[in-house]
Amino acid sequence: MRGHRSVGILSLLRQAISLGADFGARSVESLLSVAEMVEQSVVEPGSLRRTPDGLSLALDNPPLRVGAFSKVRILVDGEAIPSERVSLRTGEGTPWRTAATVTPGWTFDLGPGDRTEIRIVTSAGGRAGPVRVRVELVPLAIPPLVWVEVRETPSEPPGAP
Amino acid sequence: MTAASPGRPAASLPILLTGLASAALLDGGGDLVLPREMRGTPVEWGGVMGQCVRLASAWRFGLRAHEIDASLPATRLEGAPVPGGWRTRHAFEGIDLVHEVAAVSSVPGVVRTLRASTAAGDPVDLSVTSSFVPVLSPVLVEGIQPHRFEVTTSRDALRVRQREWGLSVRSSRPPDRLLVNRGSWLGGERRGRVEEIGTEYSLRVAPDAPASLSVLVFGGLDRDLDGFDGAAREVIADPAGAARAVAADDRAWTDRTPRLSFPEAPELERGYALARDALRRLYSAPGDGMTGLVAGYPWYSALWCRDLGWMLEALAWLGDLEWMQRSIDTVVRFQCRTSLPILGGEAGELPMQISPGPIFLYGTSDTTLYYPRLMDRWRRHSGAVELPERWPAALGRMLEWAQARADPATGLLRNGGEAEEIAVATGDVARIRYGIDAPDTTIWDSADRRSHAVDVQVLWWEALRAIADLEGSAPSRPGPAACRALADRVAASLRDLYPWPEEQYLYDSLRDGRGVAQIRPNALRATRAGLLPPPLARAIVARAVRDDLTAPWGVRTLSARDPTYDPTAYHEGQVWTIATAWLADAALEVGEPELGVEVLGRIARLLADERAGANECFRGDRPEPYDSCFLLGFSVAPFLATLFEGLWGLRVDARVGELTVRPRFPDGWRSARLERLRVGPGSVDLAWSPGRLAVRWTGPGILRVDAGAAPGTVAAGASTEVAVAPTHMPS
C-alpha cells in the first residue's frame, strides 16, 4: 500500500512537471489553489471527531454540487451505515433529521457556503487509527451521485482524557 | 425603523449586464440581488463577476436619513435599461434618487452610481451603506463559497483576497466607516472568517446641491489587480462614460452583423435579433490572453469549449471571424500534450473548460471533435489560404487522440470513463477526495450514454471530413484519403448498426455490441448531417415530433415513455432548447420547411417571452424553467446557425469565391432578404422571391452564386439575379 501511494505521488509529480512545462508555472499554481480551496472549503478541518456513540463530521460547503438532494448515504471504512443511524442538520440551532427522512419528497437542500453537520452512530468510532468516511448525496436535478471522502484519524471529543 | 415600500415590484426577469471581463446580475429592484432556483433549491446569484470569478454576492445599498432606515429596493419607483446599464429611480425621505449600475469593460468589474437630489426644504444628511458578501471563487467551482478571507485597506481602496483571487472596492468619496460582518472596523489588515463587508458614506443633499456616490467593485486574479488602478480611477470619475463605451462597442458589433428579413415570419426576424443580442452578452475576454464566449449565466460563466463550439458556428454566420479565430486559438493553446489523468486529459484532447489562472480541465468525449469542423468553417468563411500557425499541428494531435478511441472494426468512437480517471489519479494521495459518478461525458453529461453515442459518431464523421478537406493544412498522417476512408467507414457503421426498426428511429448508443433502445433527440444530428437514406431520415423526424419526445415548449432529452424518464432530471427528460433547434434543422434538411419554420418559431417565441434571456432547459412535464441558467449559448447559437444554414441553405467558400444557396422556405412565402453576409473580405446581399434570387456583392473579385438551377457570377460592386431550384425534397 505504501509503495502504491509512492507511485501515486510520483505520477502526480510527473503530471505537475508536464503541466508546468506545457502551460507555464501559473497553471500548476492555479491547479493547486483550486485543489486546496476545494479541500479546505468543504470538509471543515479537524471536524472528524469521535463521539460517545460513533463519529461526527462537518462540511462547510456542499461537495461539488449545490441543490436539493434526494438521498444521503454514509459509508465508514467501506461499510454503509443504516440511514436511521445517520443524523444531519444545516448548522447550529437547526433541527436534526435522520438520513432516512431524506427523500425526493423531502429533500436535503444545500446552497453555496451552507454548512452540514453529520452524526454517525457506528462502532468504528471506537477503533484506533484513521477511518475513512464517505458522504454520498444524490441530487434531485442531476442524478449521478456526488461524494466526498475523508480519511484521517478522528480527534477526540472535547473533555476526553 | 424601516420605510414601507411605496414603489412597484421589481422586474420579474433577471437582468444581466456584461463587459468583456465582467458581469452584473440583478433583479431590477435596485440592488444586485437575484435569487434563482438552481438544482432544486434557491441560490442567491445576484452580484459581480470579473475574469470568470464570482467576486461578490448580494451587493446592497442601505439608506438612512432622519433616523429612518430603508433598503434601496424598498424605495423603488421605476426601473429601465439605459445604454450599457440599468437605471432605477427611488424616493426616500424627500430625496429623489437615481441609481445606475453597469458592468464595464476597461476593468473586470461593476460600478454603481447613486445621485441624490431634493427639490425643496432643508438640507438632508443621507447615509449610504454599501455591503456585499465576498465570494472570490472561480465560477467553474460550483457551489463552493469560501468563508475565510484577507481584508486590507490602503489610501483609496479596500481589498479582499482569497488565495490567488482578489477584489478591490473603490469609491468616488472616502468612506466614513468600514464594516466587517456588520461591525465597525478601523481598517488595516484582517484575516479570518468574513461573511459581509461594508463601507458607509455620508452625503449632504440640498435643493441647490445634489450629491452623488459611485462605488466600483472589480477583480478576479489578485495578481492583475494593481494593473487596473488607472482604469479604475477613470471609471469612478466617469461611470456613465464607461457604461456608454460598452453600449457603443455592442452597437458597432451589431452593425457589422447580417440583417434578416422574413416578411411571412416576423417572429423569426425578432427572434434573430434577440438571439444575436443574447449571444453578444456572452462575449468574453477575461484575461490571461483568453478570448471566447462564456457558456451562460449565472452558473456557467466560464469558457466551456463544447458550448463555445456551438457558438462559434453562429459567429461564422454573424461574420465575426476575428473573434472566432482568437477563440479557436485560445482553445488550441490548452490542448493536452501528454497524458494528464489528474485533469482528465489525454494527449491531443481539447479542454472541457478554461478560465483565467489559467484553470482548465479535460475529460469529455466530444469537445475535441468540434474543432476540425470549426477550423474548416473559419477557413471557408474567411477565405484564408493558410491556417493560423498553431492549428495544423493541433489538428494532427486531435486526430491521434480520436484514433486512439476508435474501434478498429467499426471505426466508431468510444465515449465513457473520462471523469473516472480524475478520481483514480488522485485516489491514493489525497486526504480528502471528491467525485461525481458520471460514467461518461457527452453533451448530456449526466446521462450514461456509453459506449458509442450516436451524436458523437456524427461529430467524429464531420471531424474526419473536415481534416480531409483541410488537405495541405492538415498533417500528412494518415492523409486526406485515409481520413475520407475512415469517415466512410464510420458512416457505414452508423447506417448498419444504429437503425431501430420498431421505432423507425436510431438507437441512442451502442453498448456491448447492442443498440441502446432509448429515444433521444441526438439521432436528429445524423439526419441533419445527411448520413442516412432519405426515407429513414424523414421517418426519424416524424418519430421525433411525436408527443413523447416533443412537447409544445420544445424537445425533451429523453422520451417520456422511457422507464427512466424523469421530467425534472437534467438529461433524462427535461426539455432543452438546443434539442428543439436540432429538430428544426433536421426538418429543414429532410424537406419539411413548414415544420422547420414552425419549430424555429417556437424558439423565437421563447426568446421574446424571456426578453432576450434564453433558458437552458425546462421541465419535461410543463413549460417551466427548472435548474436552468437564464441565458445559455446553447439556446441561441444553434437557432442562429439554423436560420442561415438550415433555412436559407447557405454554404460559403470564400477561398474560391463561391456561395451556395438552397432556400428551404415554406410554400406560402413570397420573399426573404439577407443583407451584409460576410464572404471573405466582402459581403453579399440576397433578396429571394419564388424561383429568383437577386444578389449584390461588394467584392473584391468575382462571386459565383449557385442556387441550384443555373449558377451565375457577380462582379465586385455589381448585382445580378440567378434562378433558384425548388426546395430539395429527398426521395
Image (spheres, grey):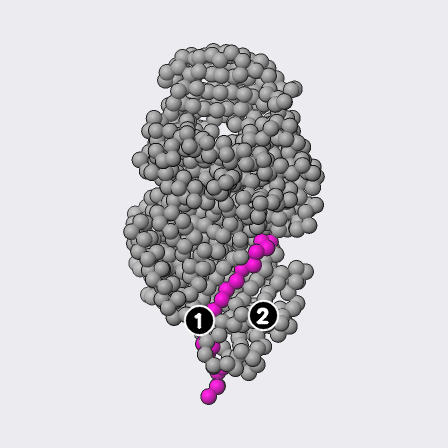
Confirm or deny contact between disc 2 and disc 1 (CB under 8 A): no
* Residue in the picture at 60% in, 28% down: B533
The disc at residue A45 is 1
Decide: few, some or many residues near mark 1? Use Cα within 10 Å; few <14, some 14-19, many ≥20: few
* Residue in the picture at 42% in, 35% down: B372
Q: Is residue B702 above or below residue B88?
A: above
For the C terminus of chain B, the image quarter is: top right
Magenta-colored segment: predominant secondary structure: loop
For the N terminus of chain B, the image quarter is: bottom right
The disc at residue A80 is 2
* Residue in the picture at 46% in, 45% down: B405
Q: Is residue B308 above or below residue B195?
A: above
SS of the residue under disc 1: loop
Q: Amino acid at mark 2?
A: Ala
Q: Amino acid at mark 1?
A: Pro
- Whether residue B515 sits left or right of residue A7 in the image: it is right
Q: Position of residue B683 (x, y in %)?
A: 42, 21
Q: Position of residue B401 (x, y in %)?
A: 41, 44
Q: Is residue B144 above or below residue B729?
A: below
Real-space CA distance between mark 2 and mark 1, rounded to the nearest whole angstrom: 23 Å
> Mark 2 or mark 1, which has the lower sequence index?
1
Residues drawn in magenta: A141-161
* Residue in the picture at 43% in, 37% down: B371
Q: Is residue B549 magenta?
A: no
Quarter location, residue B3? bottom right
Chain containing mark 2: A
Q: Is residue A147 magenta?
A: yes
